[in-house]
Amino acid sequence: METNDIVFVTKCREGDSEAFATLYDRYVEKIYRFVYYKVFSRETAEDIVSDAFLKAFNRISTYDPAKGSFSSWLYRIARNSVIDHYRANEEVSNIEDILGLGFDERLAEKLDAKESFNKISAYLETLSPKQREIIILRVWEELPYKEIAEVVGGSEGSVKMMFLRSIKEIREKFGPMALVLLCIMKP
Amino acid sequence: MDQIEKILNDLYSLDPSLRERGGDIRALVVSLIEAKPPVAIDEAFVKGLRLRLLSLSSPAKPLETHDFSWWAFRLAPLGAIAILILVFLPELTKPTPFASVSAPEVTPTSAPSDEVVVSDVITPEKDERSLKPAVSPPKSEEKLLTMMSASANVINISSKKPGVTVSVDRVELVSSGFVVIRSGNQTGEIIGSSDLIPAGTSGNVPVNLSRSMREGEALYATLHVDDGDESFNSLKDALVLDSVTGEPMYVVFSVTASAPELAPSL
């Protein structure tokens, strides 16, 4: 979280729309990536991100700094917006799977991404949806554990242990193959 | 520090034994990072949404003068109640003469600081002065309860069912720290650590593990003192040592499907 987010949140509450725009500029790309990794559709990601920021704008007065950072609050809104989108469209029966990782044929447009992504998919499919989500937030979104805990729920310690457990599980299941595939992947 | 090193250092601080097999862990982390899908965000979308948000009314309407009296009328009774509570709260929360609030006061008055603190639930079948229980925990028809103490730090932990979470029955700490679960022996591989436990008495402290406990195995619970950053790091948070032997203090507990579900509450 940016250290002065709370300054702009306070200004928002005082009626300053430009202050919200500053927060928007800071987080729109991160939130977009976060949503995109779950839906892998540009159109769907744009709908959900719009919904998330509108909700954040309308609910800014409910943000409580004592309960976590503004960044994790925004991520939680985005996460819930993904859930709401799929529930409304009745597209999946298991919402938890969407929270972990999605795969879309659009990725086939980029061959390199598809090859490396296919390899990682094999790793990540062996994990639970929550484990996948934690891996993605830590490795791809580079969130600190404390924020990840605020987004997905649970304590910082439990998130760390789950991350450790996930890495160990992947290593045990794939072992030296991880090195072999890595060598094959690189040109 | 680049991202790979940060992630690896996180993992090594949680489980130092991973360093010995660092090559494949590093390769795995690198492959996860490099597989991050590229995401191209449409700038037109970003600008359009920004304009839309700015065109909305202010996110939080400021209170107008006539609203103040509305809130004042409704909040005044609450304010009066709050004042009454503050006036009478000291009387209501006055401690009783026999309440115990800090870990060092719980031990028997005649016991030297390094004696085992005897539980009033089950007495272990061993010498009272023994600080380290046998490697095989004492057997009992009821639940097993193994304890240790050193300088008024106390940990109570009974046998546990297989699973990925250990609930430590009771912890008393002189200063804030962590319970760390190890396999093999008291300095063995770390398989779990608690969140920061404050000084004083805590019950049913959860410890999430990096692997599931296995039926029949013996695990070791140790205590580490927090170095002030409120985050467990095996390299920086010192082990609590036995004041007599200088060895790490530990409690061994067994894993069995017949273990009770929960320890009694404090």
Image: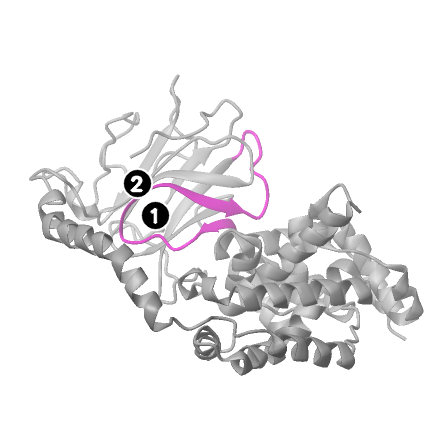
**Quick one: label 1, few (<14), some, or many (20+) residues within 10 Å?**
many
Same chain shared by disc 2 and disc 1: yes
Quarter occupied by the C terminus of chain B: top left
Who comes first in sequence, dot 2 or dot 1? 2
Real-space CA distance between mark 2 and mark 1, rounded to the nearest whole angstrom? 7 Å
Q: Position of residue B107 (x, y in %)?
A: 17, 40
In the image, what residue type sits under mark 2?
A: Met
Quarter occupied by the N terminus of chain B: bottom right
Question: Does the magenta segment cover residue B201?
Answer: yes
Q: Choose top left, top right, bottom left or bottom right for residue A164.
A: bottom right
The chain to which mark 1 is attached is B
Q: Which mark is residue B118?
A: none
Residue at 34 percent across and 47 percent down: it is B249
The chain to which mark 2 is attached is B
Left/right of residue A32 with respect to residue B263 in the rendered view:
right
Report the colour scheme: one colour
Question: Vertical placement of B242 versus A70: above or below?
Answer: above
Q: Position of residue B90 (x, y in %)?
A: 11, 49
Left/right of residue A124 with respect to residue A75 in the rendered view:
right
Left/right of residue B106 with respect to residue A169 in the rendered view:
left
Residue denoted by label 2: B148
Residue denoted by label 1: B249
* Residue B29 visible in the snapshot: no
Q: Position of residue B46 (x, y in %)?
A: 71, 78
**Quick one: label 2, few (<14), some, or many (20+) residues within 10 Å?**
many
Question: Vertical placement of A169 versus B264: above or below?
Answer: below
Q: Give whichever of A61, B157 is nearer the camera.
A: A61
Q: Position of residue B117 (x, y in %)?
A: 23, 37
Q: Which residues are magenta?
A: B191-217
Residue at 35 percent across and 33 percent down: it is B146
> Do tag 2 and tag 1 residues touch (Cβ < 8 Å)?
yes
